[in-house]
Amino acid sequence: MSANHSARSMEVFHEVFEGLPRQGPGSRACTLQALSLCRDLVAAPAILDLGCGVGAQTLVLAANTTGTITAVDLHAPNIARLNETVAEAGLGDRIRPEVEDFGALSYAPASFDLLWSEGALYNLGMARALPMCWALLRPGGYLAFTDAVWRTPDPPAAVRAIFVEDYPAMGRVSDTLQQIADAGLALEGHFTVPDAAWWTDFYTPMGTRIEELRAKYPNDPEALRALAAVAEEPRMHEEYGEHYAYEFFVCRRPS
Ligand SMILES: C[S@@+](CC[C@H](N)C(=O)[O-])C[C@H]1O[C@@H](n2cnc3c(N)ncnc32)[C@H](O)[C@@H]1O
């Protein structure tokens, strides 16, 4: 849903997403698979999680490394929720949530051993995001990110139209691999996020949340329209999911 929607529809849109375990496709298993591709990660790495949402993958990284994690997101309520989770889990010495625009970060160059970004970097455009990541990484540091990619050469116009609004530069796996190489990063591996990871922690709870909010706002036509628009996303995935995927890429700044 783009920024030219009304304030009320954006409010409802956020109310759907803030209540979910995660704000995009992914799973604990995928995060761990990508982490396992960071084969020579230093002990106690300095990690930066870009577009962390409410921190689903941040918590997996905290549980499976001994590092410290700066988790940034532009949407303040996501960071507020992550702050609560971090406090409840007693992870305040490991995870530092920050409201930040990752297009305007002021961290010193070569500050991090691991950059992580699930479903978020594309907002900046890969051509800008990947060189930025290269600069933030220490030599030998890793970048793990997911990117939406086309899986078929000629996707139907209906599905193209939706992605043109959200991610006009979306390409195929080979295009992202070329962008990784162009940014001077070395590929360590990549894999397709399985379809189950679109449903279990994302579209299935989203469906429940949409029904809750339909019941909460029965007489608010604008809210109901916004909910119908959000519900289109999982419906479209059911119909057209074979044409696109999320691909997890793990690459490294050469030493
Ligand atoms: C699809 S969600 C993914 C969230 C989380 N990584 C996950 O997989 O559950 C993308 C996130 O990126 C954040 N985001 C988008 N553009 C951003 C920017 N320029 N700076 C920081 N965060 C941004 C959004 O607020 C949103 O929480």
Image: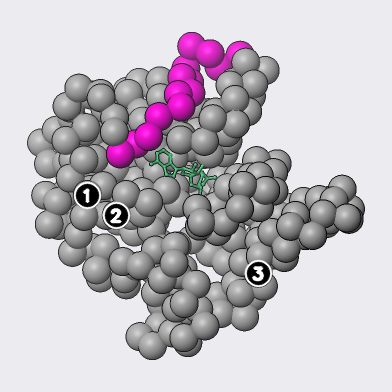
| Lower position in the chain sequence, tag 1 or tag 3 | 1
95 and 213: which one is in front? 213
Q: Residues within 10 Å of mark 1 (few under 14, many from 20)?
A: some
Say what amino acid the circle numbered 1 marks: Arg
Q: Residues within 10 Å of mark 3 (few under 14, many from 20)?
A: few
16 and 205: which one is in front? 16
Horizontal side of residue 189 vs 93, given as left or right: left
Q: Residues within 10 Å of mark 2 (few under 14, many from 20)?
A: some
Q: List x then y, in percent, for residue 5.
A: 57, 56
Range of residues picked out in magenta: 90-103
Mark 2 and mark 1: span between their CA atoms?
6 Å
State yes or no: discs 2 and 1 in contact (Cβ < 8 Å).
yes
- Residue at 12%, 57% (x, y): give it: 182
Mark 1 and mark 3: span between their CA atoms?
30 Å
Q: Is residue 50 visible?
A: yes
| Lower position in the chain sequence, tag 2 or tag 3 | 2
Label 3, ligand 1: CB separation under 8 Å: no
Labelled disc at residue 5: none
Label 2 element class? loop
Q: Can you identify the residue that label 2 sits on?
A: 125
Horizontal side of residue 181 vs 13, given as left or right: left
Horizontal side of residue 122 vs 159, given as left or right: left
198 in magenta? no
- Residue at 71%, 55% (x, y): give it: 206
Q: Can you identify the residue that label 1 sits on?
A: 128
Q: List x then y, in percent, for residue 46.
A: 32, 23
Q: Can you identify the residue that label 3 sits on?
A: 232
Give above or below for 64 relative to 18: above
Say what amino acid the circle numbered 2 marks: Gly
Q: List x then y, in percent, for residue 86.
A: 59, 20
